[in-house]
Image: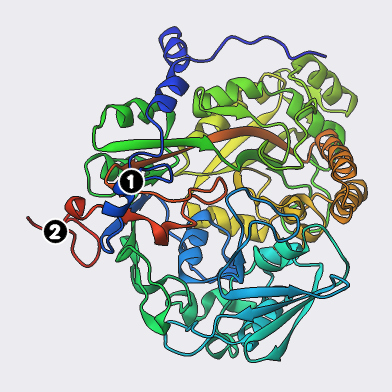
Amino acid sequence: MPASPRRSPLPRRAATRCATLLVVALSSTGCGPGGDDAPATTRATAAATGGTVVIATPTEPDHVIPPVVSSVLGRQIDDLLFERLADIGPALNTVGDAGFTPRLATRWTWSADSLSIAFSLDPAARWHDGRPVRAADVAFTYALYKDPAVASPAAALLGNVDSVTVRDSLTAVAWFARRAPEQFYDATHHVVILPAHLLAAADRARLAAAPFAKRPVGSGPFRFDAWTPGERLVLVADTTGGRRRATLDRVVWTFAKDPTTAFTRVATGEADIYENVRPDRVAEVARNAALRLDVAPGLDYHYVAFNLHRDAGADAHPVFGDRAVRRALTMALDRAAIVRVMFDTLARVALGPFPRAVATADTAIVPLPHAPDSAARLLDAAGWVRGADGMRAKGGVPLAFSILVPSVAASRVKAATVMQAQWRAVGVRVGIEQVDFPAFLARLDARRFEAIIGGWSADPGAGAVRQTWGRAGARAGGENAGRYVSAAFDAHVDSGLATFDRGVQRAHFAAAWRTIVDDAPGIWLSEPWRLVAMHRRLRPVGMRPDAWWARLHEWTIAPDQRLPRDGAGTLAAR
């Protein structure tokens, strides 16, 4: 059934304005004079070492210990503190090792049967405390990530990495259970290497409580300097070991109480970067001569996840345990209208649990339609009958649930309000719980919610969906918080990951996406454009779709545009 036409929920003036927002955003974007396409002379001028970049954010990580970090902000910090054996290239190729660049490993050698890879470590690599990085650290790290006691979300992505052994002090060998197209990606992308001498004695069941989680020691281009809770976290360029240092002197994250305050810091020059610019701020960025807006497709998507069980228990949820009811709840929503409320014209309606930019995306898939009448009939057939007040119940139990949203995410709060009204129209009573971001993440980890509006920054690899919607991710510590488990879905994903034939892979993933969309364990809402506001004095390099900060250690600031900042990164008195 085709989606029913709906009037835009925006007032006429807003609807007219929103049609131009994407044009305004695109007209203000571009790499700028110091980006990858800059003239050689300009790039040379900007190449001098020095300066501070300040990133304004409305959230704060609870810790920065990589195996159990679940926030994008925590990942940003970790990606600059620590190193992988090799980094994925700008094309985001995940098949074989084409495009990957050496990091801790200077080179690697495949075995004749492709069931092992020997990584040769950089002999100059040092931990920030001066100790050398050794192959024993690599073996320790992989064992740590895979330990069930740690309950790392990344463990679901490391199933094919059977073990890592030490050949000699500078050679670590990764062994695989089977040949697979993404085995090099699996062995390098999901894990940053950690110092065994500082973490070997840590309680693996309480890793986030270890002192290391608040004062980490890595081997990356920046080292930890200071963390003032509620205010800022500071990294400074590392100079140990004789390896090439970062071009910037320091990177500072300033924590604001809300998105408006964080954005204002960039708009007024107190900070340099603010990501996730709201649609109503796009025109303001375009008018500000000191700022530029980087607009690009990203790998983020927003979704509703249903908890298919009663909190953390095994019993089926009385509402979401019924597939027909989940489908009805999906069909009751006008997702196009919800996306307009969330992002105006700066997002697309999501097709499923995948962004369109990944290689396994099925852009021909037909989502469940917006069909309130059909939704009502499904609820009737499931025994949820309308009462005199128009609300439904079955056996005296109301058809009601709560939806959990992070209070700092204005777009999700708006979406929850619209969904609440649309569900009420078909007889479903929905409450909205707004909590701060740390509490939101804690509730997800503990499975203490009925439904949530979440956001996910997807990995480029095809196997990443195991972490978010597969059986492996449903275990404790996994990111499949709603605990959706489907043998058919898992089988198609596994088959797609095992084949070297791209056509066969696409067919298996198309079947997997069809299975999960029909099962409706969640509602896929939006796929927003990546909007990053930044000061024009910055000369960015290599802003990858999955991680714009990946090469921040190579960014530069023209010497004559380095604002005077104190050691914490704030503006100093002139």
In-front residue for pair 326/295: 295
Give the Cα distance between marks 2 and 1.
19 Å
Which of marks 1 and 2 precedes in the sequence? 1
x 71%, y 88%: residue: 166
- The residue sitting at the left extreme is 574
Circle 1 packing at 10 Å, graded few (<14), some (14-19), many (20+), is many
Circle 2 packing at 10 Å, graded few (<14), some (14-19), many (20+), is few
Q: How is the image coloured?
A: rainbow
Q: Quadrant of residue 429?
A: top right
User: In the visual, does 51 lie left or right of 278?
Assistant: left
Is residue 412 in sight in this rendering?
A: no
Q: CB atoms at circles 2 and 1 under 8 Å apart?
A: no
Place of residue 527 in the rendered image (x, y in percent of width and height, measured from the top left) = 60, 34
x 45%, y 17%: residue: 18
Q: Quadrant of the C terminus?
A: bottom left
Query: Against 33, is 4 above or below?
Result: above
Secondary structure of the residue carrying numbered label 1: helix
The amino acid sitting under disc 1 is Ala
Place of residue 499 in the rendered image (x, y in percent of width and height, measured from the top left) = 89, 52
Is residue 214 in sight in this rendering?
A: yes
Query: Against 378, is 538 above or below?
Result: below
Kindly identify which numbered label has been placed on residue 485. Answer: none
Select label 2 or label 1 by which is in front. Answer: 2
Question: For mark 1, what is the residue?
Answer: 262
- The residue sitting at the front extreme is 41
In-front residue for pair 218/268: 218
In-front residue for pair 247/521: 247
Question: For mark 2, what is the residue?
Answer: 572
Place of residue 285 in the rendered image (x, y in percent of width and height, measured from the top left) = 32, 32
The amino acid sitting under disc 2 is Ala
In-front residue for pair 18/316: 18
x 37%, y 75%: residue: 238
